[in-house]
Amino acid sequence: MFKEFNLDNFENSKKVLESKIKQSRADINALLDIEDKTYNNFAKPYQEIAEELNEFVTPIFHIDSVKNSKVTQKVQEECLPIISEYETEISQNEHVYSALKDIQYNHNSELKDIQNKYELNDEEIEVLLDNIHKVTSKNELKHTNISVNNKYLLNDIQYNTYRLLSTTQYMVIINENRDFKLGGCGLDDSLKGRLKDINLRLSELSNKFSQNLLDSTNEFEMIVDDFEDVNEIPQSDLEIAKFEENGKIKYKFTLQMPSYLAYITYGTSRVKREEIYKAYCTRAPENGKIINEILKLKYERSNILGFDNYAQYSISTKMAKSEHDVVNFLEELALKGKDGANKELKEVKALAKKIDNLSNLQNFDLAYYSEKLKKEKYDIDAEFYRPYFQQDSVLEGFFSFLNKLFNIKFVEKEVNSWDEKTKVYDILENDIIIARIFIDLESRKDKRGGAWMNNWHTHYINTKNEKQLPTAYIVCNFPPSTKETPSLLRHDDVVTLFHEMGHALHHLLSKVSEPFVSGISGVAWDVVEFPSQFLEYFAYDKDVLKMFAKHYQTGLVLDEESINRLISAKNFQSSLSLVRQVEFALFDFKLYQKLYKSEEEVQCLLDTIRDKFSVLKPPEYNKFQNGFAHIFSGGYSAGYYSYKWAEVLSADAFYLFLDSNIFNKELAQNYKNLILGKGGSVDMDKLFYELAKRNPSVDSLLKIDGIIS
Ligand SMILES: [Zn+2]
């Protein structure tokens, strides 16, 4: 039922991959030879070819991240160029594109004929398509008397089944055709050539951008030789900073994140704080010119592809419908958060005044006094909580919670994986196995940092009409257990586990028949984080926490007061952080709405946004844009807003539960069937509407974060 995780022939992967790709190529060519192409004889097997290749490739990259060695690196490096070359080749294949376009065209014209002949409206057409799909998949067509809104019996309506697509199939086709088009298919050769040059130059520029940033991050160091200036820094950070020179103990801080954060948060000397802050936000000044070239090329590329600007290009694959929607959404958030942010800032200023008689708090003081304020207000000591979050009991409680909410059971299996600490579970729904998950929670030397979910198999019905079951991996870096001590988590770790499980369930609970829009496949980028952030909220719920927050030695459940402290600490300075995130997102989005031609114009845009929304204006030397790697060397251009966009959906969905009952069975069932079960087969705004019976509202997010009441 499930493919075994097997690396016996791992070192030979390159050879196997080459032969598999050869086979895929031959299979696709055979499909292209079919005279009368339909969804079933072309688009369906076309997806299956991709799925089968993916099944082989995923573990190769996965193993390099979780069990890294010289061998895994070598295999990865051998396979990567082969797979990218093949993917590029497929994405440029005009023959596949034209076959898929024909399938879309045939569907639409068949539909139009029926619509005209039988005078059906859009809603009736939808009913018709649904029913056609149901009966054809069961081969019961001849004997069915389904009425289309009481006008006709299905049998009366004459249509060509091979031309008509179900809504799910239609989604596959329009997504594919959109992506082929965005890749430049269908353009004439000179434009294609130009597009290729642009892409090449853009990838050079984005590498240069991050290289410059890295170089200037590594260039800087700040030496502190007076212990007075570091005496508040936590021991573990101080140990790392400490070194000896000419018999004297000194401390070195750099712009690497942990080191920078240690000084800006705990460094006592204001002069030193400004020194390191200034170094940080003036990094890579040469990136200013690179930004302008990137903007110009992205603008040109979006024009070639038929968009007015890059922002439009970006949202063409996202849930957001228009530029106006995104800007409005962000400005609404900022305006609603600004009062709170001012209040929070006032609190920090008051404390700075009280402790150090500081009357002109600056950006480089904010983290320092905020940390003191946080300690004064909540005094969250991670060490106090950890014994309550023993890994095994957290997992066990988490599974009971998921069982209560979604009616799914996790049953541990003794099967192969990549590490003895990895646990494997089958997921059962009404005693039937529906999915498998690999959970690898503890940090190891050979594991990449961070936490993530990786999908392996996808749920779908194959060309032989057999159901394929989905699988996924969850990887985290929690404290390792030893023979003597169990793995004790911080509450943040618990939240991370909930988050990644949210992604995993989005993939694993899919009921969709077509692989390209099943599970997390085909889900728009700005809503991918919806199910993961949704589940996170439960990790802060009292009733849920009580299901697993038990002291591993005494068995006592975490007390009410300590739970409350966790919850209120979560919202510490949430308005300030909201306003800051929105400032980044607005800058990112507006930057791509028209062509900004010089460094001055870019700066002017940033200043205008800061004037309007910042509560604590950064000093003029702050050139934040030169380090904004997310949008200039990552994939977030005109998409940084996605973080908040998805958060609004998750908060609003969670609020539905808060408003009724956190374990509301019917609501949970709906959430499971709609949001999780339908994967990428239906647009998320439609799914959300079906769940909530209204459009999402930003107020739930603001309420959950304590920004409004
Ligand atoms: Zn995530």
Image (tube, grey):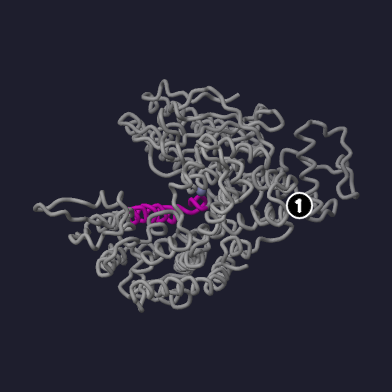
Query: Residue 320 location in percent, x, y?
Result: 59, 60
| Position of 605 relative to 565 (above/below) | below
Q: Determine which quarter of the picture holds residue 165.
A: top right
For the N terminus, the quadrant is top right
Instruction: Please report the residue visible at 35 percent of the width from the left and 61 percent of the height from the top.
Output: 265
Q: Nearer the viewer, residue 51 or 194?
A: 51
Residue 173 vs residue 228: left or right?
Answer: right
Span colored in magenta? 182-207
Q: Residues within 10 Å of mark 1 (few under 14, many from 20)?
A: some
Q: Which residue is mark 1?
A: 112
Q: Considering depth in this image, is 374 or 221 the residue closer to the camera?
A: 374
Instruction: Name which residue type carries label 1.
Output: Lys
In percent of width and height, residue 471 lies at: 56, 33
Q: Is residue 661 visible?
A: yes
Estimate the x, y position of residue 135 in percent, counting from the top left: 80, 36
Q: Position of residue 659 (x, y in %)?
A: 71, 57
**Quadrant of the rendered structure where residue 224 is?**
bottom left
Q: Is residue 521 visible?
A: no
Image quadrant for the C terminus?
Answer: bottom right
- 126 displayed left or right of 413: right
Q: What residue occupies the far left of the structure in this picture?
A: 246
Going 59% across and 51% down the picture, which residue do you hit? 560
Residue 158 image-quadrant placement: top right
Outermost residue to the front: 554
